[in-house]
Image (tube, helix red, strand yellow):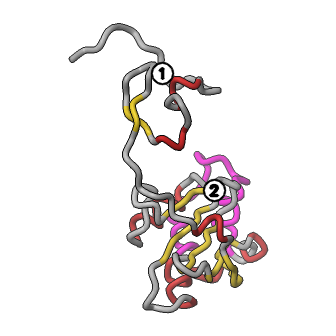
Amino acid sequence: MVNLARRFLPRDILVDVICETRKCLADAIQLLTPCTPGNHWLRIVDTGRFSAVFNDKKKGDGVRIFLDVGKLKPFPAVDAWYLKRVPKSEQNLDAILDGLNETGEALFSCYAVKVTPEILQVRPKVPPVICPVCGEAYPPYHGDLCRGCQGLKEKYYRRNSEAIS
């Protein structure tokens, strides 16, 4: 995908990427480009699709590249692996890797896109504020309280005791 994007985009631009899955694709994009969620050059919009939009970070002109399931049939091991037709314990890793190496870019399709202006907006860097409930710093655009103290739908930890250090 990254090679295809490089082929279709001008060389003299800064690129942002919108990855459409939280699975492995985002990891590969981070390894092969300077784009990461931390520097805001990689955004994850989890549609669950194995696809990504590579675009000029200033103008929004770009290309959406996706794994085209219609192109899987000639590669049965890759098809069975990707579409989870065979349990992992029964898959032949060598055949899958050989199939992926053989296919190269052949499994992907792409089309030109224009990223919406809202996505292109860069949030201004502002100093954090202190949450009046927990006393921790957080971005002011989250509201009057940090998101942790606003109450999350899913609690991701339970405090066992006082601070350790």
Answer whether residue 102 is visible to the viewer in this image: no
Q: Position of residue 80 (x, y in %)?
A: 69, 60
Label 1 or label 2, whichever comes before in sequence order: 2
What is the secondary structure assignment of the residue under circle 2? Answer: loop
Answer whether residue 105 is visible to the viewer in this image: yes
Which residue in the rendered view is the most extreme toward the left? 165
The residue pinned by badge 2 equals 45
Q: Amino acid at mark 2?
A: Val
Question: Which of 40 and 117 lies nearest the eye of the viewer?
Answer: 117
Residue 78 belongs to magenta span: yes
Residue 27 belongs to magenta span: no
The residue pinned by badge 1 equals 157
Question: Which of 162 and 46 lies nearest the eye of the viewer?
Answer: 162
Q: Is residue 16 above or below residue 159?
A: below
Q: Report the span colored magenta.
A: 75-101
- Quadrant of the image for the C terminus? top left
Question: Which of 78 and 89 lies nearest the eye of the viewer?
Answer: 78
Q: Position of residue 21 (x, y in %)?
A: 62, 56
Q: Residue at x 72, y 77 (%)?
A: 74
